[in-house]
Image (cartoon, rainbow, N blue to C red):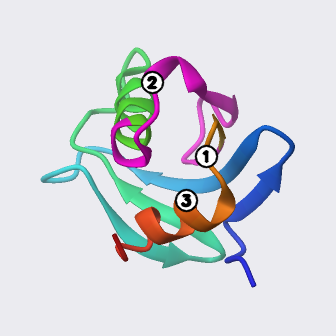
Amino acid sequence: MAPPWLKAVPDGVELAVLVQPRASRTRVVGEHDGLLKVQLAAPPVDGEANAALLEFLAKHLGVPRRQVTLTSGDASRRKRVKVVGVDAARAEAVMSGQT
């Protein structure tokens, strides 16, 4: 069974993310309230935190940055991110720290 923050979509996955900007470093810290919690070193100014989140997810899931898009939550700490070209099992393993 997939975690609540992960949803399979026809061409990839959608992640429900809770972002904590201005952290000491960028990393996944686990699940919080059914969301994948990600601490970002970037500040929430001029889209820097959103850009850092998308870069971080692309790098860790092994896909080009253009395959990772913010679908909702542009100005919120709660975001939805779509990642094309990744299956749910791989996304769960990578984001849960199992690989």
Q: CA distance from mark 1 to mark 2?
A: 11 Å
Q: Tell me which residue sits at (30%, 46%) in the image.
A: 40
When asked about the image quadrant of residue 73, the answer is: top right
**Position in image of residue 77 (x %, y %):** 54, 47
Pointers 1 and 3 in contact (C-beta within 8 Å): yes
Upstream in sequence: badge 1 or badge 2: 2
Q: Tell me which residue sits at (72%, 74%) in the image.
A: 4
Task: Name the residue that disc number 2 marks.
Answer: 64
Q: Amino acid at mark 3?
A: Ala
Task: Name the residue that disc number 1 marks.
Answer: 86
Pointers 3 and 2 in contact (C-beta within 8 Å): no
Please report the bounds of the magenta region as a residue range.
59-80
- How packed mark 3 is, by other alpha carbons closer than 10 Å (few <14, some 14-19, many 20 or more), is many
Q: Tell me which residue sits at (77%, 59%) in the image.
A: 7
**Position in image of residue 28 (x %, y %):** 35, 62
**Position in image of residue 86 (x %, y %):** 61, 46
- How packed mark 1 is, by other alpha carbons closer than 10 Å (few <14, some 14-19, many 20 or more), is some
